[in-house]
């Protein structure tokens, strides 16, 4: 390659980096430029995410059956309801006061109500949206911080777990924000732990509900007894649903050994 061609390629590469950086900054600048009040934005939801556009959001859905959902801010982890709602988009309403984001609400599906005083930024890219939301969480300046992680976890075609791990380990964010990061790390680690397993393993005459109850019971035991047992289940049990449940309860434990497990599962080749 001659010198002229090398400089042309180098210039094109630098332009691509600059364009990527500018794109990442665009959403933050657009939010900053919006007046106080409600600032709305929307982005694509990942597969398996549904909502009624108001107070219910489900995820990990397959053929209408969903493992987890949020209703009016309350979490549930089961597998016995149907979700006939919209599959997207994720819609965020940011509440801005004195130039700062003080709160947010998240919806999936539905449509915005007419509001002449709201600023609607329209559809944005999922990479830009998650970068902005996780930055909001990491700054931990308001109630919006702990709420920002949930919609970021619903975004399509992005991997956010490295940022969640940083937030979960950070000393300069509140316990609520770290707990939210750990919860969604657990969700991501559950996917990694069960990747490639397609068939449930028949454990003889043992009843599934009994085994699921045992996993829950372990989560209620003292940490030095329950956490190692849950980690063994998450790493070694051949039943993917039991592994998911063990990882779910580890995500609620706030135990540093759970973070170590999540990191191990998510960095596995």
Image (cartoon, grey):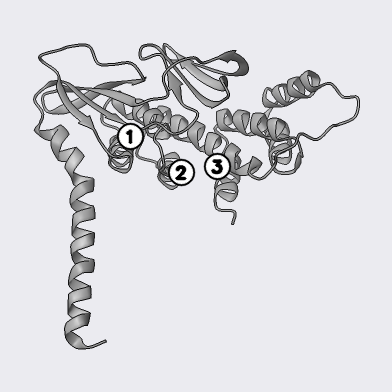
> What kind of element bears circle 1?
helix
Q: Residue at x 51, y 16 (%)?
A: 83
Q: Which corner quadrant of the image does residue 159 belong to?
A: top left
> What kind of element bears circle 2?
helix
Circle 2 sits on which residue?
Answer: 161
Relative to 238, is 121 on the left or the right?
Answer: left
Q: How far from the left and from the top, in percent, is residue 131? A: 30, 42
Q: How far from the left and from the top, in percent, is residue 101? A: 21, 27
Q: Residue at x 33, y 16 (%)?
A: 110
Q: Which corner quadrant of the image does residue 30 belong to?
A: top left
Circle 3 sits on which residue?
Answer: 259
Relative to 209, is 203 on the left or the right?
Answer: right
Judge depth for marks 2 and 1 and give the one in front. Answer: 2
Label 2 close to label 3 by CB (< 8 Å): no
Judge depth for marks 2 and 3 and give the one in front. Answer: 2
Q: How far from the left and from the top, in percent, is residue 53? A: 36, 15
Q: How far from the left and from the top, in percent, is residue 129? A: 29, 37
Circle 1 sits on which residue?
Answer: 137
Relative to 160, is 244 on the left or the right?
Answer: right
Q: Residue at x 63, y 43 (%)?
A: 195
> What kind of element bears circle 3?
helix
């Amino acid at each position: 390659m001659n010198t002229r061609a090398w400089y042309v390629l180098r210039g094109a590469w630098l332009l691509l980096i600059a364009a990527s950086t500018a794109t990442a900054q665009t959403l933050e600048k657009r939010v900053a430029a919006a007046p106080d009040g409600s600032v709305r934005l929307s982005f694509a939801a990942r597969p398996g995410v549904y909502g009624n556009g108001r107070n219910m959001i489900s995820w990990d859905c397959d053929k209408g059956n969903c493992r987890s959902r949020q209703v009016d801010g309350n979490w549930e982890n089961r597998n016995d309801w149907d979700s006939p709602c919209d599959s997207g988009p994720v819609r965020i309403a940011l509440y801005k006061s004195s130039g700062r984001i003080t709160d947010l609400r998240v919806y999936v599906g539905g449509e915005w109500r007419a509001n002449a005083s709201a600023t609607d930024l329209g559809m944005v890219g999922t990479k830009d949206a998650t970068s902005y939301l996780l930055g909001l969480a990491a700054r931990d300046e308001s109630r919006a911080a702990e709420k920002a992680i949930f919609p970021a976890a619903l975004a399509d075609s992005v991997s956010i777990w490295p940022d969640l791990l940083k937030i979960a380990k950070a000393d300069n964010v509140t316990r609520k924000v770290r707990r939210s990061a750990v919860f969604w790390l657990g969700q991501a680690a559950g996917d990694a732990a069960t990747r490639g397993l397609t068939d449930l393993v028949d454990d003889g005459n043992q009843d599934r509900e009994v085994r699921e109850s045992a996993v829950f019971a372990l989560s209620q035991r003292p940490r030095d007894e329950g956490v190692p047992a849950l980690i063994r289940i998450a790493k070694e049990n051949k039943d993917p649903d039991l592994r998911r449940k063990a990882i779910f309860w580890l995500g609620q434990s706030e135990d540093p050994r759970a973070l170590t497990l999540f990191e191990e599962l998510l960095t596995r080749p």
